Each structure stands twice: as C-alpha cells, then as structure tokens.
Image (tube, rainbow, N blue to C red):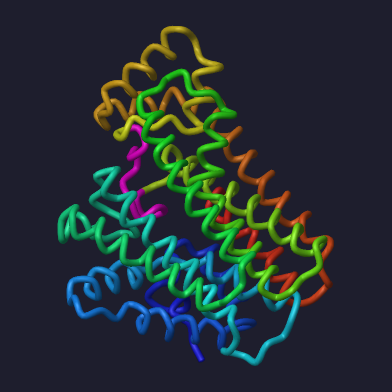
Amino acid sequence: MTSSLTAASAPTATPTKGLLADILPLVADDFAAVDHLIPRQLSSDVALVEEIGRYIVESGGKRLRPLLVLLATRCLTQPEPGAGPHIRLAAVIEFLHTATLLHDDVVDKSALRRGRATANATWGNAPSVLVGDFLYSRAFQLMVSLGHLDVMRVLSDATNTIAAGEVQQLANIGNVHLSESAYREVIRAKTALLFEAATHTAALLAGAEPTQTEALRRYGLHFGLAYQLLDDWLDYAGTSADMGKNVGDDLAEGKLTLPVILALQSVSDTEAARLRAAIAARSVAELPVVLDIVARSGALDATRAAALAEAENARLALGALPNTPYRAALERLADVATARVG
C-alpha cells in the first residue's frame, strides 16, 4: 500500500524526500489506514467544512507528526498492520496540527503555505477559523474514543499550551528586545509541543514503561525544536521553494526569530538600529539589507548549529528504547528536521 507522503504530499526538498522514502515502507499499512481515516472523520452535513478541511489536510504536508506516532508505537509493540488505536491517535495529532495551521494563517495574514494559497486567502478568515474549530472538536471526539485518560490529559494540556504560545508570539510582535530564552519558550510551546505530544501519547497508549515513555517524550520535544529552528533559519537563508511560503515572512510580520536575535547581539550599533527599524516597519522592502546584516553577523551559522544540536539531542534520547528498525527509523527521521540546512 502507498502513503500520501510518497506522492503529492511528499516534500519538495530532495534530501528530505529521500530520507522519508527509506522510512515510510516500515509503516506503509499504518499510514494508509490513517490516510483512510482522516477523510472519513472530515465528514459533515456542512459542505464548506468538508471542502476547507480536505483542502488543508490534503495540501501537501509531510505529515511528520502522525508518522512519529506510528513509528513510536512500533518501537514498543507490534499491533496488526493498519489496525489499532494508534491509527486514531495519529489522526488526532494531524487534526490538531491542521487546526493550528488554519488559525495561524488567519492571525499571520498568510497568503501562501506549502506552495499554494492558504484557506483564508481562498475562502476568507471567518470560514477558516470556524473550520479550524471544527477540526479541534473532531480531534477531541476521536481522543475521547481512545478511552485513555493519560493520553487525553497530555493532549488537552498540550493544546492549551500551544494556544497560549500563539498568544505570546502575537504579544511579542515588534519586540526588538526579545531574549533568546523567551524565543525558545515560544517555539517550544507553539511548535515543539505537538511533536512532543505525538511521541509521548504514543508511548502512553502502547503501555510503555516510564523510562521508555520519557525517552520518546524527549525525542519529540527535541525533534520539534530542531524543526522550528530550521524553519527560522530558512526564512533568512532559504528560498520560497524550500519553504512553500515567502522568504522574509517573519520580518514582514514583525517576528523576532533566532537569526535576528543573535545578530542584534553581535553587530554594530548602526546595524542593530537598521535591524530594529526594519522590524518596526514590518516591510520586506528592507529584506535585502536585513539579509546582508544577518548573514555577515554569523547568526545564520549559529542558528544552523542550534538546529543540528537539537536533532542530535533527539537521537540521543532514543538510547532507552529497544534496538529495532523502528528506533533506527526515528534516528534517521531526526535528519529530516534539518535536511535542508546543507
């Protein structure tokens, strides 16, 4: 059976595609079952719900979060291929992620994601927000059907923290004095936490012992941090083709990410003033100047190193798990988080 990851939704970056092509056959039946369950759970009497839901779910994402659920589960237990509660858990994680994307794009006024128009650019803000709400509620319906209180606790806590992280990021817009520690807390809450919840709940659902549960939780956390650090690096070092969105979006939105935070700490007062003015203006017209200052500051190299360090932390966390092809796949999957840094 083939997964959607091997076709239209495969990532465009060649290194990433190659890594996933090596990993996906291990869970092909499970992934096909998730792909079958997701559209069935998008059913609604309201046609627009299905239309927008399918558009965003089928928009070419790598579905790394549900993939982590499937691999983490099989590190610990071997259910029948394509069957078991971990299939529903993977769908829950994907719906939670998709709901956050719909809301994020409205908040950020994004017009492009994964190389095509966002739902809010196509249908408007109100339908996008409301369909995001539908996906959240459908995720919680599926979550309840698992009948596992600890899983529900972790996911409900994660969802609440993710929402708070989004609010904090919004509050930080234009804050040119944002510290690295405050930035890292935001990316932990708004991005890394759902990766962490994916592997953590997979371990809980599989009945793993505490040491293995903690190992998988830490793996997901560090994987997610590496993934977001790479995204922030790409916003200043990549291309629109790399990201599926416009280069300089963070600058245009007034967001301080690690490359700019580190650059502000090392450049001259004159260049720091230029950076702060560009952030305050929230205009891509200043992007060439900002890119030049950030590149010369060494901040891109430092951000790249930080992403690679988190990916290595993810790999090291797996030491408590049995040495199986699924653990090896998770180790290789850590390379996906940083495959585009060259």
x and y percent of residue 16 in the render?
A: 53, 63
Total marks in image: 0
Horizontal arrangement in the rendering, residue 320 relative to residue 333 (left or right): right
Compared across the picture, whether 296 is left or right of 73 comes to left
In percent of width and height, residue 213 lies at: 75, 63
- Asked whether 88 falls inside the magenta stretch, the response is no
Among the 4 quarters of the image, the one containing residue 179: top right
Q: Please tell me whether residue 243 belongs to the stretch shown in magenta.
A: yes
Residue 139: horizontal and vertical position, in percent? 43, 69
**Where on the picture, by quarter, is residue 115?**
bottom left
What residue lies at 34% left-to-right and 73% top-to-bottom?
Answer: 58
Residue 137 x, y percent position in the rendering: 37, 66
Q: Is residue 155 above or below residue 257?
A: below
Q: Is residue 128 above or below residue 328?
A: above
Judge by depth and name the residue closer to the eye, 21 or 131.
131
Q: Which residues are magenta?
A: 240-251
The residue nearer to you, when weighing 132 against 317, is 132
Outermost residue, left direction?
123
Look at 74% across and 81% down and name the residue there: 77
